[in-house]
Image: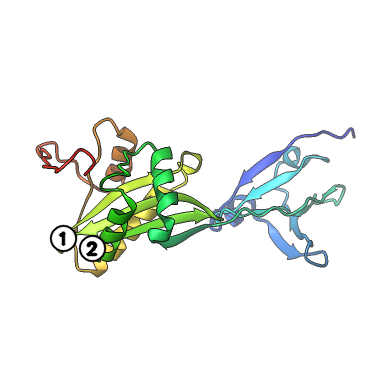
Amino acid sequence: MARRRGSCILALDALSAGAALTPALKKGGEGENSFASLNYHSSIAPSMLLDGIPILLLLQSHVYYTHTIRLPDDRTELKMDTEEIPPVVQCDLTSADYEEILALWRRAGLTVRPDGRDAPAAFARQLAGGLQRVVGLRVGNELVAVAVLTHDGRKGWINRLAVARTHRRQGLARRLIGEVERRLSRLGIEIFACLIEEGNSVSMEVFERLGYKRHPEIVYFTKRKSEET
């Protein structure tokens, strides 16, 4: 049989992998670069496992694993190097992360006022007051998502939510919103709110999917000491 070159990507999660593919995982190989052996049942279409086509498994933890693949009759064995992608890690952000936070806000298209409300001293003062916390998500050393939570003792606010464009549609906004809600709930706060600029339909859809109600009857007023405030 002539060798064919190509790739086949299988997206799996921890719950559906067994039901969808019914694989049996066994440890194999030796040393740090050892492989696992994945034996496919006859329900897998042979065309997906042709000789020479690498298989890539994407697990729900966002870590890539590669395996030694054997067809049922052991005609074909593929070996590939293991590649790991850093998991998404939640973290509390501080004044030390100020430059990264502002850079992410800018990349995400948020308005930033570095000479006013977002100045380094103002940012540090807001954190020191105890009513503001900043939660982030990192992939490796890269900050890929951020949200600011504040409250007045009665109502909690989700502010300045931003996700890097390269990491959108991966559930990161949902994860941050859920974390903010949990923290506010522990304080006894039962109202969660956010302000979204008109035209930001993506953010509106995210919050509406999570059960937030739009209030078109409310008009937002502010009085600022300066345009940078």
Q: Position of residue 142 (x, y in %)?
A: 52, 51
Q: Which residue: 89% across, 32% down?
A: 2
Label 1 sits on residue: 152
Q: Secondary structure at mark 1?
A: loop
Asked whether residue 179 is in view, the answer is yes
Q: Is residue 150 above or below residue 11?
A: below
- Residue type at mark 1 is Asp
Q: Residue furthest top?
A: 199
Q: Position of residue 178 (x, y in %)?
A: 34, 57
Residue at point 82% right, 33% down? Answer: 4
- Position of 35 compared to 60: left or right? right
In the drawing, does residue 95 fall left or right of residue 14? Answer: left
Residue at image point 85% right, 47% down: 76
> CB of mark 2 within 8 Å of CB of mark 1?
yes
Q: Earlier in the sequence, mark 2 or mark 1?
A: 2
Looking at the picture, does residue 165 appear above or below residue 86?
above
Q: Which residue is mark 2?
A: 131
Estimate how packed mark 1 is, as few (under 14), some (14 to 19) or many (20 or more) residues with alpha carbons within 10 Å. few
Looking at the image, residue 180 sits to the left or right of residue 89; the answer is: left
Q: Which quadrant is home to the C terminus? A: top left
- In this figure, which colouring scheme has been used for the structure? rainbow
When asked about the image quadrant of residue 94, the answer is bottom left
Find residue 199 and name its label.
none
Q: Amino acid at mark 2?
A: Leu
In which quadrant is the N terminus drawn?
Answer: top right
Q: How would you rate the neighbour count of disc 2 (Cα within 10 Å): few for under 14, some for 14-19, many for 20 or more?
A: few
Residue at position x 31%, y 59% in the image: 124
Q: Could you tell me how far apart the alpha carbons at marks 2 and 1 are, in whole angstroms? A: 8 Å
